[in-house]
Image (tube, coloured by chain):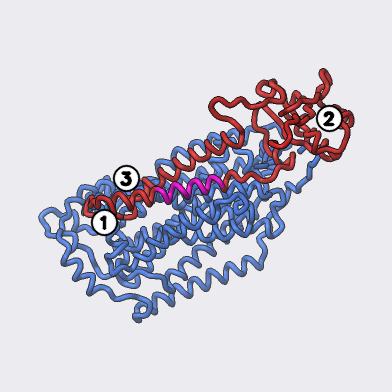
Amino acid sequence: MAEVHVHYNLNEKYTFTPELKKKLAIGMGVGLVLLVLGVILAYAGIGFGHHEAHEAGKAAQDAGKHAEVGHHGATPLTRLWANLWLNGVFFTYIAAMGVLFVAIQYVAYAGWSATIRRVAEAFGAFLPFTAPVLLITFFLGGHDLFHWTHHDLYEKGKATYDPIIAGKAGFFFFPLAAGSFPLFWVLRLVAFIGIWYALYRMLIKNSVAEDYLTDKTDFSYHKRNITIGAIFIVFFGLSESVSAWDWVMSIDTHWYSTMFGWYVFASSWVSALAVLTLAVVYLKENGYLKMVNENHLHDLGKFMFAFSIFWAYIWFAQYMLQAYSNIPEEIEYWVARHDGLEGVYSPMIVMNVIINFLFPFLFLMTRDAKRKEIFLKITAFAILMGHYLDFFVMVMPGTVKGNGGFFLIEIGTLMLFACAFVYVFANQLSRQGLIAKNHPMMEESLHHSI
Amino acid sequence: MAKSKEPKKYLVGIYDHEEKVVEAVKKVQKEGVKVEEVYSPHPIHHIDTYIGHPRTRIPIAAFMFGATGTILAITMITFMMKIDWPMIIGGKNPLYPPTMVPVTFEATVLICALGMVATFLITNNMGPGKVEFMFDRRTTDDKYALVVDLDKNTKSVEEIRQILIKYGAETTPPPRIVEKS
């Protein structure tokens, strides 16, 4: 090892080229056009299923009060809100998981990732863009998306009174009266994303300041970031679970799963790892990050492989127990995703397991596959699409019911968000050196070999 | 082995540091000496590739054992739950796939683990009652042994001995010949 010592350019900077900027702007524009077109076409009855009649019949069959309550037929506008919410939540989590990746690297004293840390550090810049989207979507479309926002659920004596949801009122409305403004819920949304972003800025600040050190033995910035990283991990561990209940699980208000926080974590964490892998491979292909070799890629591949299995484990554990025990309040969630709602979502849930578990499991199993860029690119892309689908299956059945599907609204919103994410990501990446050159464990990363 | 009872001859160089033996393996081979094996008290990263051993087929064996476990478990569950004594639990089909997963998973891991232990013992000539031949007892303690198969090398013993010493082998005593039958 000692005799081969290649000197890499640690001062390299990523340039966000005008061509890429233009491409991304066009992507966002096309996404927006498709989105608007999709809504207009949906109002004209194209690409939008009319299942209301069936649904009403089905709802009438269901015993229990909640069948009568709040089952407005989903309008195309509901589907727009649902898509904005779905993408907002998905990309918020990807951005936050990027920060988590950085925090973990600090706290674990990880040396291998020193060369790619800046790439992961660029994720969090998208948080301030998704938070307003989530808030606006909630204020404009929350009533369509979240069943619990209906105030008649909380009025005792009314036919619409729902004792189960009324029992959960404090979680949404504290300290205000049940059925009024969900202050606690909104505050949590703002506080979680706000604190994640604040800690992210602190990490970035120290990380960039480290680049300008003249004394190479000064590890004070690194040590400070270890503390901030530890605080982030603890806070994120708690808040991510709660945010998953808030943003995703509360759509199906009656239903609950004690594993839901983990489930959402697994799904978004592996998505973020896929984005990171794609970004690293993209940068390598464009002549950056020369020091990142197949050993680093192998580690990223192992991460994706392992957490795909972790996701499958969590998903399966949640699914099997509820499907087997067959308790009405639990099974309604799965009925909506299988035969219920005309079976719109039943192919998706099968695809979900195939794309997110079987494909990466078999495709990335060998050592060689994890070390080749093309294999990683294919798997990372599949995982990313697969977990978008996973979130789709989480959000859609509870919001748009049987009117869900993939058409212009879905494609447009996804394009809009994906291009915006890449734009913000690339912009953040170009702001400072592409490599954290004064990382105390840089030498270890350069010689990383597995 | 069976046709010749004559013991094979090896030259064993002793090193006192991991880095020395790794450097020696690389450089000795550059000088044209074929290294047979390196014995170390602890695992050394990539030593197999430096020696030039072919890629290990252990992962393939692991996959095969795992697949055997999977097939075994599915066969077993199908026989028990469908053919021999059909049972309906929780109102589900006797072969409700999600319920098969935990047992299949466990059987896969179990057969894989047992198979890998067996593979390890067989490939390393270990097991109850077996005594592994050791080129130098100190390789379980604090020394590293670089073993050269003299039959596979055309250079003379003295030449190889000098090359080993040149790249850091201990000289007291110098690399010596060990016979293994």
**Mark linked to residue B2:** none
Label 1–label 3 contact, CB within 8 A: no
Label 3–label 2 contact, CB within 8 A: no
For the residue carrying disc 3, how many other residues have a C-alpha within 10 Å: few (<14), some (14-19), or many (20+)?
few
Q: Which residues are magenta?
A: B61-72
Amino acid type shown at disc 3: Thr
Residue tagged 2: B164
Amino acid type shown at disc 2: Leu
For the residue carrying disc 2, how many other residues have a C-alpha within 10 Å: few (<14), some (14-19), or many (20+)?
many
Which image quarter: residue A374?
bottom right
The chain shown in blue is which?
A: A
Q: Residue A176: where, in percent of width, then height?
A: 25, 48
Q: Which circle, 1 or 3, is nearer the viewer?
A: 1
Give B118 or A263, whichever is nearer the viewer. Answer: B118
Q: Which circle, 3 or 2, is nearer the viewer?
A: 2
Label 3 element class: loop
Residue tagged 3: A258
Kindly identify which chain the residue marked by label 1 belongs to: B
**Mark linked to residue B93:** 1
Residue A168 position (above or below residue A23): above
Residue A330 position (above or below residue A449): below
Q: Is residue B65 magenta?
A: yes
Label 1 element class: loop
Image quadrant occupied by the C terminus of chain A: top right
The residue at 69%/21% (across/down) is B137
